[in-house]
Image: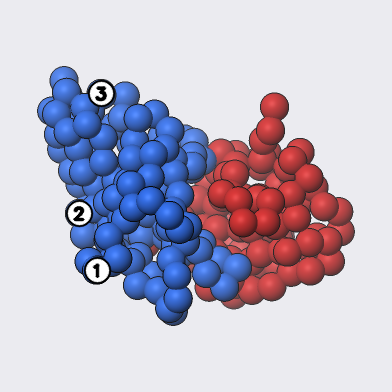
Chain colours: A red, B blue
Amino acid sequence: EAQVTQNPRYLITVTGKKLTVTCSQNMNHEYMSWYRQDPGLGLRQIYYSMNVEVTDKGDVPEGYKVSRKEKRNFPLILESPSPNQTSLYFCASSAQDQPQHFGDGTRLSIL
Amino acid sequence: AQSVAQPEDQVNVAEGNPLTVKCTYSVSGNPYLFWYVQYPNRGLQFLLKYITGDNLVKGSYGFEAEFNKSQTSFHLKKPSALVSDSALYFCAVWGANNLFFGTGTRLTVIP
């Protein structure tokens, strides 16, 4: 089954404790992206990757890092999380010029 | 710069009645438009897209969307609403390797 898998689905943590949200896709897609969803703001892009070792900033990259060492994986790293990064996060992937497939989301709460 | 606007936060419709969820867009160049649906605790699911061609686009689950260039609109429609259509709907436009989302419209279909 074609899917985008995110882990964990839920996480409560504390300010400053580094965390990584993993994202993996099994569709051999070149393009991958991270979004955060906040009430009243819709989804906003954090980072995206056009292919292995090619990443670039989206609209709200501050406080986040990503890496793309393999085509299937695109982890999101919060080196020093802060409460304003409490949000619902989505990973997505797509082939060129095709609609994006989304994971089921990761709800992060940073205290 | 690309952007979309969804003027209604909430739309209520009786089961069996036609539904419309509104979206207007602002783009430089030709628009590449999408509708996605989000059910509780799930990621976004692709409904339909417009690139070029017919102004009436048919998508999944009986949904369609009407592209209107003069009004810069891309409204989502369905002839007969189902209770199971109740969800959060997002309009989006593609540009600069990014999917720009509206703020979402919550559709409630009343039995």
Q: Are marks 3 and 1 in contact (CB under 8 Å)?
A: no
Query: For the point 70% across and 27% down, which residue is it?
Result: A1
Check chain identity for marks 3 and 2: say if they share one: yes
Instruction: Tell me the quarter of the picture where residue B26 sits.
Output: bottom left
Label 1, on which residue? B70
Q: Residues within 10 Å of mark 1 (few under 14, many from 20)?
A: few
Q: Amino acid at mark 2?
A: Glu
Q: Is residue A104 visible?
A: yes
Q: Is residue A79 visible?
A: no
Q: Residues within 10 Å of mark 2 (few under 14, many from 20)?
A: some
Query: For the point 44% across and 44% down, which residue is it?
Result: B48
Residue furthest front in the image: B53
C-alpha span from label 1 to label 2: 21 Å
Q: Nearer the viewer, mark 1 or mark 2?
A: 1
Q: Which mark is residue B83?
A: 3
Query: For the point 43% across and 33% down, which residue is it?
Result: B60
Viewer-proximal residue among A64 and A33: A33
In the displayed structure, would residue B110 be above or below residue B29?
above
Q: Position of residue A64 (x, y in %)?
A: 65, 68
Residue furthest top in the image: B111
Query: For the point 20% across and 54% down, which residue is it?
Result: B8
Mark 1 residue element: loop
Q: Which mark is residue B8?
A: 2
Q: Position of residue A26 (x, y in %)?
A: 76, 38
C-alpha span from label 3 to label 1: 33 Å
Q: From the viewer's perspective, tell me whether residue A93 is left or right of residue B51.
A: right
Q: Position of residue B30 (x, y in %)?
A: 45, 70
Name the chain under label 2: B
Mark 3 residue element: helix
Between disc 3 and disc 1, whose residue precedes? 1
Viewer-proximal residue among B76 and A73: B76
